[in-house]
Image: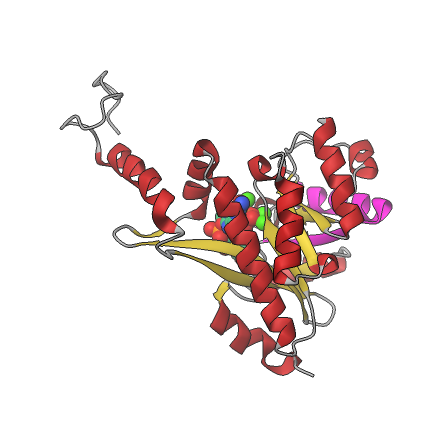
């Protein structure tokens, strides 16, 4: 990107770089993407390492842009956090995934945990709880099967966030700390918060069992989780070797390309739900 023009605040300068232009365009397109039905959810299984059975799914959003094609969620989630669109978008995500879960259960599949990513902006929005309760009521989602994934850097010290956590616990909704290990948390704070699950960040799993630092980090997280009675999910598991290491070190649940990429609903059903009907 060119940084030397000094006129980067002017919107349609002819020498403006393509990237900046398309970001602007993208932000605008984001506003209409829900009603234009350009978003969809994909589902990635969480696997119990001891028996290979699916115990849950993580719902992840996809945006198929009519001109740009697939846009990375990293990119447009951040954009929507900056412009506030994450609030309606986050509601759409919750509603779509919960409705899907309800349909699976109504179709006779035995219920499993549904994990949904929640942006910090969404989580700390004053109406979050009210809206969540409404979505739960509307969709028929069972709260005890719902797990909200929030990143570790959420301002928990902030009283408001801990009140929400408490209320969620009352509702029966589970909380998972995503990307665990990349932010700051102390034992103390994990102990007092109503956290159910730690999701070890992919960066620590990546070069297991060869990287001594990551071996130590994962083992430390495992013993900490055991001490605090927290569930642990390893994310980004891609190889048999990683899986064996995790199993040996007491990790119960894994997620990653080794088992499956996130799949569109139909493909997920064909691959993981076919034989779980009673
Ligand atoms: P995340 O929550 O940490 O999600 C895990 C990411 O790792 C997903 O990328 C998933 O496709 C990818 N992944 C899963 N297994 C593997 C693996 O074995 N190897 C590798 N290399 N990657 C793997 P994705 O879908 O592109 O999402 C990226 C991030 O965007 C997510 O990170 C999350 O922070 C955000 N995001 C995605 N969907 C949503 C959503 O519905 N709501 C919110 N608020 N954020 C979302
Ligand atoms: Ca996640
Ligand atoms: Ca993660
Ligand atoms: Ca992440």
Q: Is residue 273 left or right of residue 28?
A: right
Q: Report the label total.
A: 0
Q: Is residue 19 left or right of residue 273?
A: left
Q: Residue at x 40, y 48 (%)?
A: 72
Q: Residue 96, percent across and down?
A: 53, 59
Instruction: Using the image as rendered, state which of residue 152 and residue 105 is in the foreground.
Output: 105
Q: Residue at x 49, y 41 (%)?
A: 86
Q: In this view, does 267 lie above or below 64?
A: below
Colouring mode (rainbow / by chain / secondary structure / one colour): secondary structure
Residue 69 falls within the magenta-colored stretch: no
| Farthest-out residue, top | 6
Q: Is residue 179 visible?
A: no
Q: In which quarter of the image is the N terminus?
A: top left
Instruction: Using the image as rendered, state which of residue 4 and residue 138 is in the foreground.
Output: 138
Q: Residue 172, percent across and down?
A: 77, 53
Instruction: Using the image as rendered, state which of residue 119 and residue 226 is in the foreground.
Output: 119
Q: Can residue 133 be seen in this view?
A: yes
Q: In this view, does 207 lie above or below 255?
A: above
Give the residues in magenta.
213-235
Q: In this view, does 20 lie to the left or right of 229?
A: left
Residue 230 falls within the magenta-colored stretch: yes
Instruction: Using the image as rendered, state which of residue 106 and residue 40 is in the foreground.
Output: 106
Q: In which quarter of the image is the C terminus?
A: bottom right
Q: Which residue is drawn at 23% across and 16% down?
A: 6
Q: Residue 31, percent across and down?
A: 37, 43
Q: Residue 249, percent across and down?
A: 76, 55
Identify the main secondary structure in magenta. helix
């Amino acid at each position: 990107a060119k940084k030397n023009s000094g006129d980067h605040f002017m919107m349609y300068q002819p020498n403006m770089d393509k990237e900046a232009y398309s970001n602007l365009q993208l932000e605008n397109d984001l506003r209409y993407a829900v009603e234009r039905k350009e978003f969809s959810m994909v589902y990635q299984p969480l696997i119990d390492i001891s028996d290979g059975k699916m115990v849950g799914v993580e719902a992840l959003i996809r945006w198929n842009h009519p001109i740009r094609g697939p846009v990375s969620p990293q990119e447009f989630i951040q954009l929507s956090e900056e412009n506030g669109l994450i609030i309606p978008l986050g509601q759409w995500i919750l509603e779509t995934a919960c409705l899907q879960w309800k349909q699976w259960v109504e179709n006779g599949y035995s219920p499993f945990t549904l994990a949904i990513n929640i942006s910090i902006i969404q989580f700390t929005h004053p109406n979050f709880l009210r809206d969540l309760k409404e979505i739960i009521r509307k969709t028929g989602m069972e709260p005890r099967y719902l797990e909200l994934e929030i990143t570790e850097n959420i301002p928990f010290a902030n009283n408001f966030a801990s009140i929400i956590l408490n209320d969620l616990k009352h509702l029966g909704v589970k909380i998972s700390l995503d990307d665990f290990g990349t932010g700051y948390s102390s034992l103390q704070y994990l102990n007092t918060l109503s956290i159910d699950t730690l999701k070890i960040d992919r960066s620590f799993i990546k070069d297991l069992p060869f990287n001594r630092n990551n071996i130590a980090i994962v083992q430390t997280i495992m013993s900490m989780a055991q001490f605090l009675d927290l569930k642990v999910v390893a994310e980004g598991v891609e190889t048999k070797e990683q899986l064996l290491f995790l199993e040996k070190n007491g990790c119960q649940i894994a997620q990653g390309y080794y088992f499956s990429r996130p799949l569109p609903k139909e493909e997920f059903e064909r691959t993981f739900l076919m034989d779980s009907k009673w």
